[in-house]
Image (cartoon, helix red, strand yellow):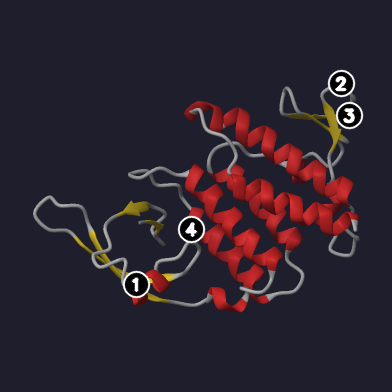
Amino acid sequence: IKFLSDTDELISGIVYGGLSKKKINIFQIGFYLNLEVSFKNNRPPSINAELSEPYVSNIINDKYKLNCLLCVTSLINLSIVEGQKVKNIYNISNDFLNTMFFKKKWIRNFFIFLFKLLKIIGYEIDYNHNLNNKYFNLETLEFSNNITNHSIEFPYKLLNDKNINFDYVSIEQIFKIFETVFTKNHLSNFNLQLPNQYHLFKKVIIERLKS
């Protein structure tokens, strides 16, 4: 298995007896764990763990939250490699997931998380300091008041106005901007693609808003 630690590192190791019923139930994608990692004689780390809050059982019957959890873990997995430290990646992930687990209104927090993730891996989209620029250019990745064939209207209100109602057009704009920046600046460097879990979550959210 591999896990993101609260020291902002990705660590992998072996769970001995991992096919036992008890351990299979513990080592699931997206679970929070209290970990014990042992290093012996140059062998791969040995991992033992106990479940910790928040528990996935809280959201197991909510397809939106469950798909969001898988989406977030898959994005984290692409944003950090083993042996690398990405400062605050644990904190921004933990803060969002705790909001998602326990609050009814959380989708805006998800989009804010996406932009925080871009920032900490080095590709900040500083929309708070570009409020006077209406458009975002998907080719140059810059804000502007001039519309071009590559421009998209930036959905400031969706990110900054807690009282606004969501619409699928603004949601699609957010996804498009994140996908473009994340793919051009990060995934292309490693010849990677956005994960299926991301596309599935995007699909269920947009279908919900269109219905």
Crowd class of label 1 (few under 14; some 14 to 19; many from 20; radius 10 Å): some
Q: Is residue 143 left or right of residue 1?
A: right
- Residue count near mark 2 (Cα–Cα under 10 Å), binned few <14, some 14–19, many ≥20: few
User: What label does residue 145 carry, if any?
Assistant: 3
Locate the C terminus and report the quarter of the image it occupies: bottom right
- Identify the residue at image location x=48%, y=29%: 190
Type of the residue with mark 1: Lys
Say if mark 1 contacts mark 4, CB within 8 Å: no
Foreground mark, 4 or 3, reads 4
Amino acid residing under circle 2: Asn
Tell me the number on the disc at residue 49. none
Residue 116: tell me if it is visible: no
- The Cα–Cα distance between marks 4 and 2, rounded to whole angstroms, is 37 Å
Disc on res. 149: 2
Q: Nearer the viewer, mark 1 or mark 4?
A: 1
Image position, residue 48 (x, y; %): 28, 70
Please give the residue where the numbered disc 4 appears in the rendered image: 90
Residues marked 2 and 1 touching at CB (< 8 Å): no
User: Amino acid under label 3?
Assistant: Asn
Sequence-first disc among 4 and 3: 4
Q: CA distance from mark 1 to mark 4?
A: 24 Å
Mark 1 or 4, nearer chain start: 1
Q: Quadrant of residue 40?
A: bottom left
